[in-house]
Amino acid sequence: MTGSVSNRIRVLRFLNGEMSQVELGQRIGVTRQTIAAIESGKYSPTLEAAFRIADVFKVPLQEVFTWDANGAAGQGA
Amino acid sequence: MAYREKIGWLSLFAMALTFGPYFVLVAMHVYPDAALPDVRQLILFGVTAVAQAFIIGAGHLYFRRSSPDEARMPPDERDRAIMQRSISSAYYVLIAGMIMVGVMMPFNSGGWKIVNAALFMIVTAEVVHHGVAVASYRRQAS
């Protein structure tokens, strides 16, 4: 089964005053390493965490995460 | 490196350093397979268990002091997912080992052979538990 989730977290962090991974992690309740793993596409967050990230940046979910049906399968947890 | 990955490495290191030599000595029959209780075997096991507890305790203390914020933070969703995967992998190893030790070995072995086989399966399950966790953290590291 193919498909992958890509994200714009790095861009959104930049647009929000170069918010650090630590600060974003603290605001949604995960570690800096988890933010790094999400950002690099190596870990797919739960729906709840995804909504929390979108809420921090005050944008709709689809502006943070996009689904590419032809991309390589994500690694998940 | 994530705090819980460090703990995983610490546990693997402690087991390699303590139960590694323990099972080498047992396999070399330095301590004969005598009937229970065998004081020398008991002492060997006691020293091994205390050494492991000491290494893990000292390691936890060191990591807590070097990164207190990370140590205080409860496991997040990725930690929990990795924990769930590693524990379920170790569970199958432990169950298979316990069936072998508890159901099959009593027919042809006894005494410390059974005790050590059970210990070996517990340690193997722990190695799988921490090994899968560490591998998962490494795979997702940037």
Image: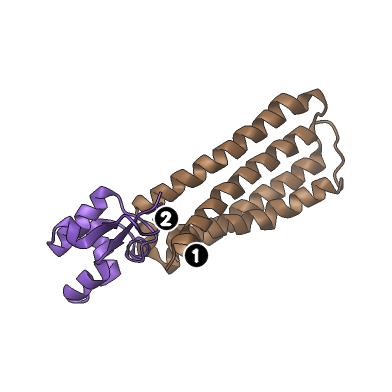
Chain colours: A purple, B brown
Residue A60 image offset from top left, x and y in percent: 14, 58
Q: Number of labelled discs?
A: 2
| Residue A25 in sight here | yes
The chain under label 2 reads A
Mark 1: amino acid: Tyr
Q: In which quarter of the image is the N terminus of chain B?
A: bottom left
Residue B98 image offset from top left, x and y in percent: 65, 32
For disc 2, the neighbor class at 10 Å (few under 14, some 14 to 19, many from 20) is: few
Residue B10 image offset from top left, x and y in percent: 56, 59
Query: Looking at the image, which is closer to me, A23 or B41?
Result: A23
As drawn, the label of residue B62 is 1
The chain under label 1 reads B
Marks 1, 2: nearer the viewer: 2
Mark 2: amino acid: Gln
- Label 2, secondary structure: give it: loop
Q: Residue furthest front?
A: A70
- Residue matched to label 2: A75
| Residue B60 in sight here | no
